[in-house]
Amino acid sequence: MLAYKAVYGQSLFDVCLNTYGTFDYLAKLLIDNNVENIDITPYSGQIFNWDEMLVADQQVNITSQNSKIIYATSVIKNGSVLSVIESKSQGGGISIPNYYQPPNQISIAKYQITLETEYIAEGGETEILISDLIGASIIQITRETQPLKINEFSFNTNNGQITFIVSPLNEYETIYIIYS
């Protein structure tokens, strides 16, 4: 048995697809991990045990892992980790060379691959430094479930510092940052 670490925005169906590559083993995934309700939303970092010998299509599994494809389709309040950057229905758009277009996609939209990180506050912070953000572009910052407006924070790309303009962070408040 291997351990799989869930990410924010995943449903149990996504975890099943990322591990077994099919829904055929969804019941096994639930039983092996003592999950009683299919409607629960996994939390970021939650560990799920799965049997690597039961993968439906090894080639699909290998391709997904090598391409770092993570299915995260649950409805979340703070937006998606994919940003639409070009769509013919929008009359074209900006051209960004590092885009992702899902396989077998009928839509003509292209998506920007983004990364995410989170920060759990100690309380009272108005500035935080995150070295992963040096040289990055912020797509979205969310305080718990509320996306911040552009005038509610400032970002220094040179040192990865985010300054919260409106109010300091509360103790144990979680900040989700989507960046490219």
Image (tube, helix red, strand yellow):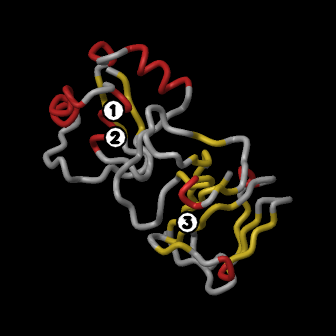
State how far apart marks 3 and 1 are (Cα). Answer: 27 Å
For label 2, the SS is: helix
| Left or right: where 16 falls relative to 116 | left
Residue 90 drawn at (x, y percent):
58, 61
Residue 94 drawn at (x, y percent):
71, 55
Mark 1 and mark 2 residues within 8 Å of each other at the beta carbon: yes
The quadrant where residue 92 appears: bottom right
| Residue bearing the label numbered 2 | 14
For residue 17, the mark is 1
| Left or right: where 51 falls relative to 5 | left
Answer above or below: position of 71 versus 147: above
Amino acid type shown at disc 1: Leu
| Residue bearing the label numbered 3 | 175
For residue 142, the mark is none
Residue occupying the point 29% across, 34% down: 16
Amino acid type shown at disc 3: Ile
Which of the two discs, 3 and 1, sits closer to the camera?
A: 1
